[in-house]
Amino acid sequence: QWLRLRYAVQTWNSSAWWREEREVLSLYPPDGSILLNPTSQQLQAFLDRGEEYWGDADMASLEWLREKQGRTYLNTLEHRPALLFFYQEPCGFFFLFREAGGAEYLPFDAGGEDKGRFTRYIGGEASQFPRSACVSRAIAREIVQEFFTTQRRSDAVSWVTATSVGFPVE
């Protein structure tokens, strides 16, 4: 019986499910909760939240986490892209796309006039954001859906490197 028990323990220890490790796309809303493996419908419903939700809220993000042995580790994976965003009345949605490796991009109306900047508190710090980088809710849906599906920047808007438009403002 001892040998059978020892064999059962060894088999359990070496089984794949116990050591399974995977990368999980996660939504971090500004309220601090985490939604693992959100559906497209959940993301679209999240974008439909109005000014009463977003108000002075921090940024939301779609980022990749590592899940191992049923536990989720909250450090984001640098080898995966991330999409950070918030809603600012009356400008619309502001997005920052971070490529794997760290390059950052903003949607930007390069043909339009300079629309100035607005101030928003992110992480308790006042930050300046270009108004020309904000998009409508309809475009925001396309950006999020493309990221959800392919982890790439959407063709629905033009993108520029964040530093080329002086963002972030130091």
Image (cartoon, grey):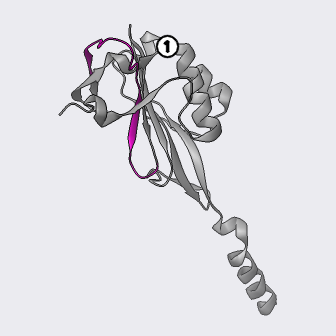
- What residue is pinned by disc 1? 136
The C terminus lies in quadrant? top left
Question: Residue 111 or 121: which is nearer the viewer?
Answer: 111
Q: Residue at x 27, y 31 (%)?
A: 167
Question: Which element carries disc 1, helix, strand or loop?
Answer: loop
In the figure, residue 90 lies in which quadrant?
top left
Q: Is residue 104 magenta?
A: yes
Which three-letter amino acid code belongs to the residue tagged 1? Ser
User: In the rendered structure, does residue 152 fall within the stretch colored magenta?
Assistant: no
Please state, as top left, top right, bottom left or bottom right, where the N terminus lies in the image: bottom right
Q: Total number of numbered labels?
A: 1
Residue 126 percent coordinates (x, y): 21, 25
Instruction: Tell me, yes or no, if residue 47 can be seen here.
Output: no
Identify the residue shown where x is 47% and y is 30%.
Answer: 29
Dominant secondary structure, magenta: loop
Name which residue lies at 59% across and 23% down: 142
Hey, which quadrant is residue 168 in on the image? top left
Placement of 52 over or under 162, stated as above or below: above
- Left or right: 43 as drawn, with respect to 128: right
The extreme front residue here reads 111
Name the side, left or right, on which 67 lies relative to 93.
right
Mark 1 closeness class: few <14, some 14–19, many ≥20 residues within 10 Å: few
168 left or right, relative to 140: left
Q: Position of residue 34 (x, y in %)?
A: 51, 38
Q: Quadrant of residue 52?
A: top left
Residue 97 drawn at (x, y percent)? 44, 36
Going by the picture, which residue comes out furthest to the left? 170
Q: Is residue 6 visible?
A: yes
Give whichever of 32, 45 is nearer the camera. 45
The span shown in magenta is: 100-120
Camera-side residue of 136 and 12: 136
Whole-percent x, y for residue 5 in the image: 77, 85
